[in-house]
């Protein structure tokens, strides 16, 4: 008897999206120390793979990097901030691929939560590209 993978419906994807949004609203350092974080990342990665859209590849790669980073012990704030920031922008952009409006809304909220988490983690170190350029120019003088 062959077992077939039952495709997830939009409700399951929405539940996973809600879980990820709630997770990002918590203290990420505390979440990193809990056992369930790895499962959140894995569900998220699997949901994206189920969509089977090559445009989402970078999000999958960044999530796998983030999962590996959190699973590796010491958390490098700069790496996590960079990944969260890029994931936020790419996730908001990916909302157009959601066929269900409720899912699209959650994807947008998730992207916004990722960007907010990146800013929270980066704190005052978060610069705009113009500020980075100005800082680089000042250092090269």
Image: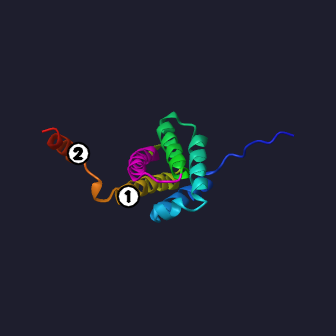
CB under 8 Å between callouts 2 and 1?
Answer: no
Taking the spot 47% from the left edge, 65% from the top edge, the residue there is 26
Q: Nearer the viewer, residue 91 or 58?
A: 58
| Pointer 2 or 1: first along the chain | 1
| Picture quarter with the N terminus | top right
Residue 12 pos. (x, y %): 62, 55
Residue 65 pos. (x, y %): 50, 43
The range drawn in magenta is 73-95
Farthest residue, direction left? 141
* Side (left or right) of 43 relative to 70: right
| Picture quarter with the C terminus | top left
Residue receiving disc 2 = 132
Q: How is the image coloured?
A: rainbow
Query: Is residue 87 within the magenta segment?
Result: yes
| Badge 2 element | helix
Answer above or below: position of 12 versus 25.
above
Q: CA distance from mark 2 to mark 1?
A: 18 Å
Query: Is residue 80 within the magenta segment?
Result: yes
Quick check: can you spot residue 98? no
Residue receiving disc 1 = 121
Q: Nearer the viewer, residue 20 or 67?
A: 67
Q: Badge 1: few (under 14), some or many (20 or more) residues near its Cα, within 10 Å?
A: many
Q: Kindly report the secondary structure that dominates the magenta region of the rendered protein.
A: helix
Residue 88 pos. (x, y %): 41, 50
């Amino acid at each position: 008897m062959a077992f077939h993978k039952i495709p997830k419906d939009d409700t399951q994807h929405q539940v996973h999206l809600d879980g990820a949004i709630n997770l990002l609203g918590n203290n990420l350092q505390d979440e990193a120390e809990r056992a369930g974080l790895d499962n959140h990342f894995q569900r998220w990665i699997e949901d994206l793979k189920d969509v089977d859209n090559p445009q989402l590849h970078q999000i999958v790669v960044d999530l796998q990097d983030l999962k590996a980073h959190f699973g590796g012990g010491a958390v490098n704030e700069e790496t996590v901030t960079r990944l969260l920031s890029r994931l936020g922008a790419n996730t908001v952009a990916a909302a157009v691929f959601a066929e269900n409006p409720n899912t699209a809304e959650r994807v947008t909220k998730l992207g916004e939560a990722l960007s907010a988490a990146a800013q929270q983690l980066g704190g005052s170190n978060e610069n705009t590209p113009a500020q980075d350029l100005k800082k680089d120019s000042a250092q090269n003088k």
